[in-house]
Amino acid sequence: MICSGAFRMLHVKSGHKLEEMEAILRRAAQNHEASILAVSHLGSLLREHQPKSSLDVVSFTVCQADLYAALLAADVRFAMVIPCRIAVSSTGEGSLMQSISPRDFCRVIGRPDLERLAAPLEAVLKGMMDDAARMEARAAHAGAADRSSGLGATEEQVSARATLPQRIDCRGSKIEDLAGTGEHDAQGG
């Protein structure tokens, strides 16, 4: 760990190229009973505003719900840092994975007594990054292919962008019936 401003950072260097890291981190997350909720290609966003930028970075949003519940119950301010993110940037010889230390966040909010709850989350993040650095790229791609060979897409492969809202409310009423387009409507204009 290195100290960076107010937060200590977890960091792990990898020999893998940035393009390989999504499949590798998904496999590492699965090995730690976590999942990748979102992948944000921030380097391309930066190049939209600064075309000469050569910075390439991808942010992975990691979910480990079992560990999050205890932290949120203890102090709602943990919502500022969870779900956790792992930033992966391209380096000359591979990539660098970085994340904020959950244990250090306890000290920042004045709750060092919660470090025992944050320690397992930090261990999962560090373990995922360490596993990803050691994992062979081919094995990660094979694991991703195994998951995608079933019927349809998995939850993490589906984008909710531009989806239609649900047409049935929580009581089972169809929106069309509530809107007055059902059989009980009067005929005519």
Image (spheres, rainbow, N blue to C red):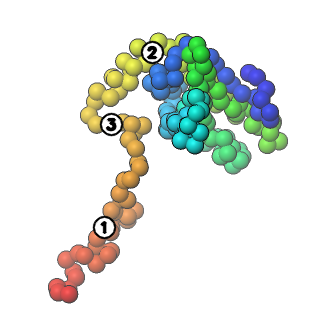
Q: Are marks 2 and 3 in contact (CB under 8 Å)?
A: no
Q: Position of residue 76 (x, y in %)?
A: 69, 49
Q: Are marks 1 and 2 in contact (CB under 8 Å)?
A: no
Quadrant of the frame with the N terminus: top right
Residue pointed to by mark 2: 137
**Which mark is nearer the camera, 2 or 3?**
2
Residue pointed to by mark 3: 153
Label 1: which secondary element: loop
Q: Residue furthest right?
A: 110
Q: Which mark is residue 174?
A: 1
Relative to 124, residue 180 above or below? below
Quarter holding residue 100:
top right
Q: Position of residue 119 (x, y in %)?
A: 70, 28
Q: Position of residue 139 (x, y in %)?
A: 41, 14
Q: Are marks 3 and 1 in contact (CB under 8 Å)?
A: no
Q: Which mark is residue 88?
A: none
Label 2: which secondary element: helix
> Could you tell me the amino acid type at mark 1?
Lys
Quarter holding residue 125:
top right
Q: Is residue 165 visible?
A: yes
**Which mark is nearer the camera, 3 or 1?**
3
Q: Residue at x 19, y 77 (%)?
A: 183
Relative to 168, residue 97 above or below? above
Q: Residue at x 33, y 63 (%)?
A: 168
As measured in the structure, the alpha-carbon distance from the residue carrying label 1 to the one carrying label 2 is: 47 Å
> Could you tell me the amino acid type at mark 2?
Ala
Q: Residues within 10 Å of mark 3 (few under 14, many from 20)?
A: few
As measured in the structure, the alpha-carbon distance from the residue carrying label 3 to the one carrying label 1 is: 27 Å
Label 3: which secondary element: loop
> Could you tell me the amino acid type at mark 3?
Ala
Q: Nearer the viewer, residue 111 or 13?
A: 13
